[in-house]
Image (cartoon, helix red, strand yellow):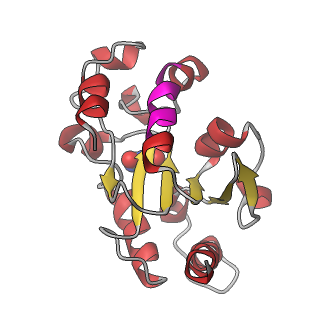
Amino acid sequence: MTAELLQGCSTCTACALAYTRQMVVIARGNPNAELMLIGEAPGAREDATGLPFVGRSGQALDRLLSDVGFDLERDLYVCNAVKCRPPNNRRPKRAELAACRPWLDRQLELVDPDVIVLAGATAVEAILGIKGGMSQLRGRWQHWNQRAVMPVFHPSYLLRNPSDAPGAPLDLTRGDLSAVRRRLCER
Ligand code: URA
């Protein structure tokens, strides 16, 4: 993470979330990775530690990424559309997404990923501007600014739907992440 990004985000007061956060949550993983995963916003554990996807959702996500062969430290950069925790884990408001967007754009510029995974509807809406059901959107390659983009179910949805049966959300997500890995390996 660059000092400029850290300093800028840590002192940001562009929206009201700045006044309820404990820590700004910027990123984890490899800033030189070819893959960037974007989630929604920090939860309680992320707010306390300053790292994205380290709570239950994050553990579920890490397990899936490891299952399909990703090295979590080396192969991806993980961040969120919004860098501060919304109170009670509510969805970020449109104005909060807009206020935080310059930081996400800066991350995209710095990391310059070839492939982006969008975890959940908020990230899909933030990047692709598409509002819709994740059941329709997931698993279909999209393109944004010359980058390949794969929407996947949000890990918190997977925690609420833990069946590992073929065709269940977990199984579908494993398939979607495998497709991402294949695409990166084929290049
Ligand atoms: N934790 C995060 O960092 N992001 C999410 O979208 C959910 C949990």
- Per the rendered image, the range of residues in magenta is 99-107
Residue 159 horizontal/vertical position (percent) = 47, 63
| Left or right of 45, for residue 99 | right
- Magenta region, main secondary structure: helix
In the rendered image, the quadrant that contains the N terminus is top left
In the rendered image, the quadrant that contains the C terminus is bottom right
**Residue, x 49% and y 63% (percent of image)?**
34
| Left or right of 165, for residue 75 | left
Residue 151 horizontal/vertical position (percent) = 66, 57
Choose between 46 and 11: the one closer to the eye: 11
Residue 108 vertical placement versus 118 (above, below): above
**Residue, x 60% and y 40% (percent of image)?**
122
Choose between 22 and 118: the one closer to the eye: 118
Q: How many marks?
A: 0
**Residue, x 33% and y 47% (percent of image)?**
27
**Residue, x 52% and y 34% (percent of image)?**
105
| Left or right of 34, for residue 117 | right
Q: Quadrant of residue 126?
A: top right
Residue 171 vertical placement versus 29 (above, below): below
Residue 18 vertical placement versus 39 (above, below): above
